[in-house]
Image (tube, grey):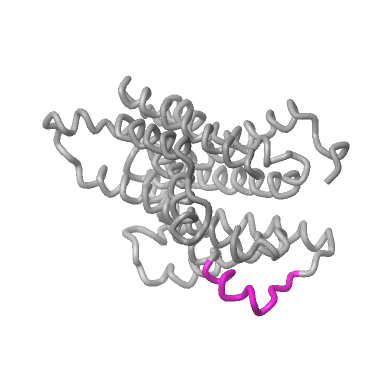
């Protein structure tokens, strides 16, 4: 894409900040929906349904053919399964621990992606990259308030499961990114995006009767739950489709780090809407984690 067709950088940055905030709002609304009786699987099905419909209509309007060559089929099916798992894990995490903390843990994926790429024959992380990773991990220990836990604070089983789901989210998403970059990069983005989101929808509908998660397929119990579920669909679909449409004009190779506003926005929205707060040690750890992630992202985009 020519430089002339790119959006002005200040406009691109503003849009990315708004998109990151929209995704944060989606997670806050999901937490409200879950608190009002909405099943986890139903929440993800509703979100995936609205995004699949919107993206499908967009592709029809653009008259883009949806075809996955046979050599990509297995990897595309794997990607759909990974993203389905990632959706379930992140919602399981925000149901148990503060949303901002869940997103901080989930944002460990750049570290895991770098290590996975190295293990599978890619570039070895530089000494600078490894140093940044170590700083991020130290910040995560502070964000999780490990010093308090070591001093004798009681470990809650739900808290531990929430953190584990957040780490699982990061791992599964890192694998999905590796598959996308190394096995599906030649597949048009429109085809890959639609197939992935529609696979998520189909897989969740198929799994919903089995009761794999407590309350997984239950509907909202009250109007607040229905409103929150509607907001989940609206924010996720608007963010997903906007990013899909405008990605070629946002110069993501340079500006992608600004999407890391999501944990910050979730911290603010969680405080305002959910009365979720983190102590000073956790806030310091969160700041260290976000700073490190942004540095890693800038290193990655510079190499690209």
Residue 70: within the magenta?
Answer: yes
Relative side of 131 to 231, left or right: left
Judging depth in this view, the residue of 279 and 236 nearest the camera is: 279
Q: Residue at x 40, y 29 (%)?
A: 286
Seen in the picture, residue 83 relative to 154 is either above or below; the reply is below
Q: Which residues are magenta?
A: 66-78
Q: How many marks?
A: 0
Magenta-drawn stretch, dominant element (helix, strand or loop): helix
Q: Is residue 222 visible?
A: no
Return the x and y of residue 66 as percentages of the image width and height: 74, 70
Q: Residue at x 57, y 57 (%)?
A: 48
Return the x and y of residue 235 as percentages of the image width and height: 60, 42
Q: Residue at x 51, y 30 (%)?
A: 265
Seen in the picture, residue 85 relative to 27 is either above or below; the reply is below
Return the x and y of residue 176 as percentages of the image width and height: 52, 59
Relative side of 145 to 176, left or right: left
Return the x and y of residue 9 as percentages of the image width and height: 75, 29
Which residue is situated farthest in the right direction here?
4
Relative side of 142 to 127, left or right: left
Judging depth in this view, the residue of 109 and 104 nearest the camera is: 109
Q: Is residue 236 visible?
A: yes
Q: Residue at x 44, y 58 (%)?
A: 119
Residue 67: within the magenta?
Answer: yes
Seen in the picture, residue 185 relative to 207 is either above or below; the reply is above
Quarter of the image that includes the C terminus: top right
């Amino acid at each position: 894409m020519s430089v002339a067709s790119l959006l002005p950088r200040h406009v691109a940055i503003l849009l990315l900040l708004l998109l990151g905030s929209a995704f944060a709002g989606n997670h806050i609304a999901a937490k409200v929906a879950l608190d009002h009786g909405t099943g986890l699987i139903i929440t993800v099905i509703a979100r995936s349904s609205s995004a699949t419909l919107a993206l499908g209509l967009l592709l029809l309007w653009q008259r883009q053919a949806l075809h996955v060559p046979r050599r990509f089929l297995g990897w595309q099916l794997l990607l759909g399964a990974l993203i389905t798992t990632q959706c379930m894990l992140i919602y399981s995490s925000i149901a148990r621990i503060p949303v901002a903390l869940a997103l901080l843990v989930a944002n460990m994926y750049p570290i895991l992606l770098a290590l996975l790429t190295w293990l599978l024959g890619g570039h070895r992380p530089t000494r600078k990259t490894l140093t940044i990773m170590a700083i991020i991990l130290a910040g995560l220990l502070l964000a999780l308030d490990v010093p308090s836990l070591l001093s004798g604070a009681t470990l809650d089983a739900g808290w531990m499961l929430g953190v584990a789901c957040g780490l699982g989210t990061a791992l599964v998403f890192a694998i999905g990114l590796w598959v996308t970059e190394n096995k599906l990069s030649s597949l048009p983005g429109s085809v890959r995006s639609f197939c992935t989101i529609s696979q998520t929808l189909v897989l969740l509908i198929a799994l919903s009767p089995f009761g794999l998660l407590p309350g997984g397929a239950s509907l909202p119990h009250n109007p607040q739950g229905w409103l929150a579920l509607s907001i989940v669909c609206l924010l996720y679909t608007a963010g997903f489709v906007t990013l899909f449409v405008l990605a070629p004009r946002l110069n993501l190779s340079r500006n992608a780090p600004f999407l890391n506003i999501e944990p910050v926005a979730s911290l603010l929205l969680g405080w305002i809407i959910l009365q979720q707060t983190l102590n000073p040690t956790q806030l310091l750890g969160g700041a260290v984690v976000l700073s490190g992630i942004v540095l890693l992202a800038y290193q990655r985009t510079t190499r690209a």
